[in-house]
Image (cartoon, rainbow, N blue to C red):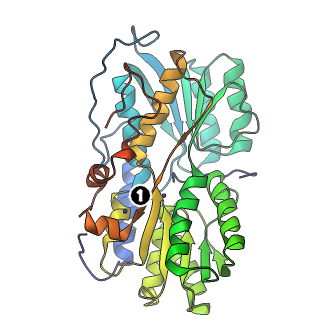
Amino acid sequence: MSEPHPDPTEIRHMAHSRSITFAALAATAIIALTGCAQSSGDAAEGSTKTTTAASAPLPAPFDGDPVSVALVRQSGAGDYFEAWGAGAKSQAAAANIDLTITDARNDNAKHASDLEQAIASEPDAIIVDHGQTDTLQPLITKAVDAGIPVVVYDLALTDATGVITTSQSDESMASGVLDQLIADVGDGAKVGYVSATGFAALDRRAVVWDSFVADHDLDVVFSTGKVSESTASDNIPLVDAALKQNPDVEAIFAPYDEITKGAVQAVIQNNLQSKVKVYGIDISNADLEVINQADSPWVATSATDPAAVGAAVVRSLALHLAGQLDQDDVQFPAIVITQDFLAENEVDNVDSLREAEPSLTLDTTVVADWLPATS
């Protein structure tokens, strides 16, 4: 998922060791936090993007001076966000877009200030990546009223008039991996839920979870979880406590990869990896390392390719500016990736995952002859 952000209303081995240490997770978080800094940077490792040559000349307004676009981000922990940003920058370069990036890093006040400054700079368009509805809605309305085209990603709006909304398909992401959970443990199983409320994407996934719980008579023995600047490590003690009270749980649904990694570590700390299966959402190189560890309880995840999604958001904007986008809500489909699939196909990074699952590139989603997907 892209890391969710506050909102008041809202998918298959190279084993290195037999345990996933807390230190490894912490190191991953530190690397991700460093790599997700705002503005420019190199593409995330394992998410290198190359450009397929366009077969037609660029249309207006891309056929002259670079089109100025402000990308106003609210990213978080995990290398998902680094890959997303790399994909956006690669696609922007291919479309003659001058992309100016700010990143509020979980600071809602700064996110609002960044958007305010972007509006004042009068760019040709604005992309808003995540954020809090109450904080951003008035400013997005202000931008639209000022005649600035706006595209938002994974942000719930109370008024989307004049805005292009984009998102991962949270319903398909959750339902796909939960179908796998039911196939593995069956109806009536004892399950745990690790998530948080008040976040757009997680709230949408929670609706699917509640439906599966009811439809399959799942016995939810614990619900816990939080989102923070250190989501993975902060969820370890929460899930650890829940597991000590409910060691007979059979499966855990943790619908955001940073939360998933915390749940995985807690399962291992309690020596329950042979008994408890963990199901997550999202994928990255760090996630693949965790899933591929010997005896890892993380058996399935539901995901898009974050670099492909970042690129597709930029293409959605470009097609809109060229008058060639025939929809105002664009959703990016996900797939279920199982631990067995990764092992069978010897997948250990996102590049090799794209080779095994080419649909992840989104190269047929919001594209044109002059605007092919970067891949």
Image position, residue 5 (x, y; %): 61, 51
Residue 48 vertical position relative to residue 209 in the rendered view, above or below: above
Report the residue marked by disc 1: 283
* x 39%, y 47%: residue: 82
> Dot 1 lies on which element?
loop
**Left or right of 192, for residue 280:** left
Can I make out residue 124 in this image?
Answer: no
The number of callouts visible is 1
Can I make out residue 267 in this image?
Answer: yes
Image position, residue 306 (x, y; %): 42, 47
Q: Quadrant of the C terminus?
A: top left
Comparing 246 with 101, the one in front is: 246
* x 66%, y 68%: residue: 212
**Left or right of 12, for residue 347:** left
* x 66%, y 16%: residue: 147
Residue 188 falls in image quadrant: bottom right
Q: Bin the neighbour count of mark 1 within 10 Å (Cα to Cα): few under 14, some 14-19, many 20 and up.
A: many
Residue 225 vertical position relative to residue 87 in the rendered view, above or below: below
Image position, residue 249 (x, y; %): 57, 86
Image position, residue 357 (x, y; %): 34, 51
| Amino acid marked by disc 1 | Ile
* x 23%, y 70%: residue: 14
Residue 298 vertical position relative to residue 102 in the rendered view, above or below: below
